[in-house]
């Protein structure tokens, strides 16, 4: 079940808001007025768990995944089509308080090339060269569709995280991602495994194909072409401030991590990120990596950063990094700036058909264990560029109609101030997913889990929060933060009015001044003086009646201080 707030931990907060110097503001109900978003700044990850904006405010992202895994491999505005993504979608996301979408893009759409698997010009063993499969005009046509979705989201104040998505590498293995020409199985015919799609992770032909990708030991230069595609994407969006960053490879994997030491594959993965000329270390930080001989000198991170000097790069560990339930990722220091550690949390005790838990308690325990490992991995990635590790982001969780499971994940993230993107916005007939994954159901209604995904939460904090608690059953929100002298601008709290405050809400602040109007979708707070801490509370219903000396001031729809 969802963690309930600890009343003993809340008591100092309650005491602080019961004394003098508290400002109240009452809003009578959800407002149809949405404030027009301004142009955001590029976000930064200077070190430590948080993202920051140009005003040095901590930024927290909540949102969802939008990934269309059939041709044309992108959800974009195209009325009447199953992949249509419209302003209605974006407006609904905004009304739920979402401010980020992890948008799936695919290699096979950016570099479709020609021909099928095992072409000699690609798959012959030898020094990597140019397979002549890339066509800039084709990539630009696809990216124009991607840009159309980014633009719609920006109109509603929603960032986009561009995610190069794949599952089981390629459609020949009942997945998606890599183009057919980039599949090399040493000439062995591909026979997809039956049963659930994920059974193909143990397919021996898949093992061969991904081995050639991770070692880059064929003349087609698979990693080099992948890096070229990413450089093309980054160059296209390098000036777009509504793009928060890039996720280079969704759920990287090799079947060897199920049977061999995890560090074997993690070393290859880190070499893919860095390239041979920029090697880092594994988590022990002791032995420098030795990359496969044919891996490009500049990996995917430097390939992106060579053309884009602003955006964040969200690196993922391998998909089997918690095999056994208590093994943190072996990713270590990666010698680049602007990195974010980007992880997924799914328990194994779920139905292969619906994705819902078959053993809820076991599922919650499994996900708690996995979540507890995150900061270990983040800190193990500390480098000279991010001395206290990169920022952290949970880019996938959920795929369920279980309110208890989704609520557990969002509550853990809220207590730890970790941003997230739920999987997924819609089902989109996902070939590698489950029928339970969509927040928006086929009839257009929301799944019941909307009550734990739409939350009152701080989107920007002019300081460091020491406590953030939201109760989705009552709508009660409490936050305490220490103002930062280096932070400019106001603290911004998104009010989940449509889901939790149908008859209105009361905001109370001590140590700051409310600067937003009653009924605004965002509560904004300016620090008053030099308090050690600022206390913020939002509760359902009307504010307390004014003290006798305040009579004559009308609180409904307005502000009362005492």
Image (spheres, rainbow, N blue to C red):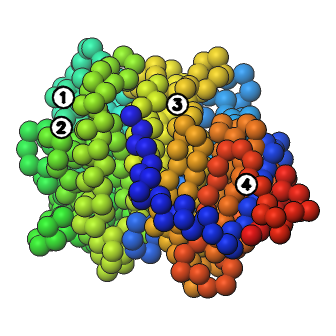
Q: Nearer the viewer, residue 17 or 444?
A: 17
The answer to which of marks 3 and 2 sits earlier in the sequence is: 2
Residue under numbered circle 2? 255
Question: Are dots 3 and 4 in contact, CB under 8 Å?
Answer: no
Of the numbered discs in the image, which one, if any, rests on residue 449? 3
From the viewer's side, name the closer residue of 272 and 422: 422
Left-right relation of 426 to 379: right
Q: Is residue 234 visible?
A: no
Left or right of residue 371: residue 530: right
Q: Are marks 4 and 2 in contact (CB under 8 Å)?
A: no
Cβ atoms at labels 2 and 1 below 8 Å apart: yes
Pick whichever, 320 or 408, lies toward us.
408
- Residue extending farthest to the left is 260
Question: Is tag 1's residue or tag 4's residue first in the polypeptide sequence?
Answer: 1
SS class of the residue under badge 3?
A: loop
Measured in 3D between alpha carbons, the distance from the residue under mark 1 to the one under mark 4, in whole angstroms, is 61 Å
Look at mark 4 in the image and give the residue it sits on.
544
Query: Which comes sooner in the sequence, label 2 or label 1?
Result: 1
């Amino acid at each position: 079940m969802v963690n309930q707030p600890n009343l003993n931990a809340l008591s100092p907060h309650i005491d602080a808001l019961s004394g003098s110097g508290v400002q109240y503001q009452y809003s009578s109900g959800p407002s149809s007025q949405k404030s027009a978003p301004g142009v955001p700044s590029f976000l930064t990850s200077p070190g430590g768990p948080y993202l920051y904006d140009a005003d040095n405010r901590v930024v927290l992202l909540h949102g969802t995944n939008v990934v269309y895994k059939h041709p044309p491999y992108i959800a974009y505005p195209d009325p009447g089509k199953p992949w249509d993504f419209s302003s209605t979608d974006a407006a609904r996301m905004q009304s739920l308080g979402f401010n980020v979408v992890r948008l799936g893009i695919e290699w096979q759409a950016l570099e479709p090339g020609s021909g099928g698997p095992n072409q000699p010009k690609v798959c012959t063993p030898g020094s990597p060269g140019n397979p002549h499969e890339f066509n800039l005009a084709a990539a630009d046509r696809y990216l124009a569709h991607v840009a159309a979705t980014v633009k719609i989201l920006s109109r509603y104040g929603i960032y986009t995280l561009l995610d190069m998505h794949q599952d089981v590498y390629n459609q020949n293995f009942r997945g998606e991602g890599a183009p057919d020409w980039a599949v090399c199985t040493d000439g062995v015919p591909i026979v997809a495994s039956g049963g659930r799609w994920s059974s193909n992770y143990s397919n021996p032909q898949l093992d061969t194909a991904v081995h050639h990708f991770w070692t880059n030991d064929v003349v087609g230069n698979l990693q080099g072409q992948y890096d070229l595609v990413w450089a093309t994407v980054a160059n296209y969006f390098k000036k777009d401030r509504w793009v928060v960053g890039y996720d280079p490879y969704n759920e990287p994997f090799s079947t060897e991590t199920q049977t061999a030491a995890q560090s074997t594959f993690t070393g290859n993965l880190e070499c893919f990120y860095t390239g041979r000329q920029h090697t880092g270390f594994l988590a022990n930080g002791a032995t420098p990596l030795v990359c496969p001989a044919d891996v490009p000198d500049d990996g995917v991170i430097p390939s992106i950063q060579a053309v884009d000097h602003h955006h964040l790069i969200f690196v993922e560990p391998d998909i089997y990094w918690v095999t056994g339930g208590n093994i943190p990722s072996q990713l270590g220091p990666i010698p680049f700036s602007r990195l974010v550690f980007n992880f997924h949390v799914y328990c194994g005790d779920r139905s292969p058909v619906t994705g819902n838990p078959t053993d809820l308690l076991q599922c919650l325990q499994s996900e708690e264990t996995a979540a507890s490992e995150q900061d270990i991995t983040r800190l193990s990635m500390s480098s000279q560029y991010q001395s206290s590790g990169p920022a952290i982001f949970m880019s996938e969780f959920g795929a369920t109609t279980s309110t208890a499971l989704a609520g557990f994940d969002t509550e853990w993230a809220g207590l730890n101030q970790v941003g997230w993107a739920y999987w997924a916005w819609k089902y989109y007939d996902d070939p590698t997913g489950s029928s339970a994954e969509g927040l928006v159901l086929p009839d257009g209604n929301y799944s019941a889990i909307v009550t734990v995904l739409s939350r009152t939460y701080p989107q920007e904090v002019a300081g460091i929060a020491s406590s953030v608690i939201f109760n989705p059953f009552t709508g009660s929100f409490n936050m305490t933060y220490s103002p930062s002298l280096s932070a400019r601008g106001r603290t911004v709290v998104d009010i989940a009015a449509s889901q939790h405050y149908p008859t209105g809400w009361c905001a109370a602040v001590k140590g700051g001044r409310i600067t937003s109007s009653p009924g605004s979708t965002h509560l904004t707070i300016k620090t008053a003086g030099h308090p050690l801490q600022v206390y913020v509370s939002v509760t359902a219903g009307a504010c307390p009646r004014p003290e006798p000396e305040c009579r004559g001031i009308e609180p409904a729809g307005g502000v009362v201080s005492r």
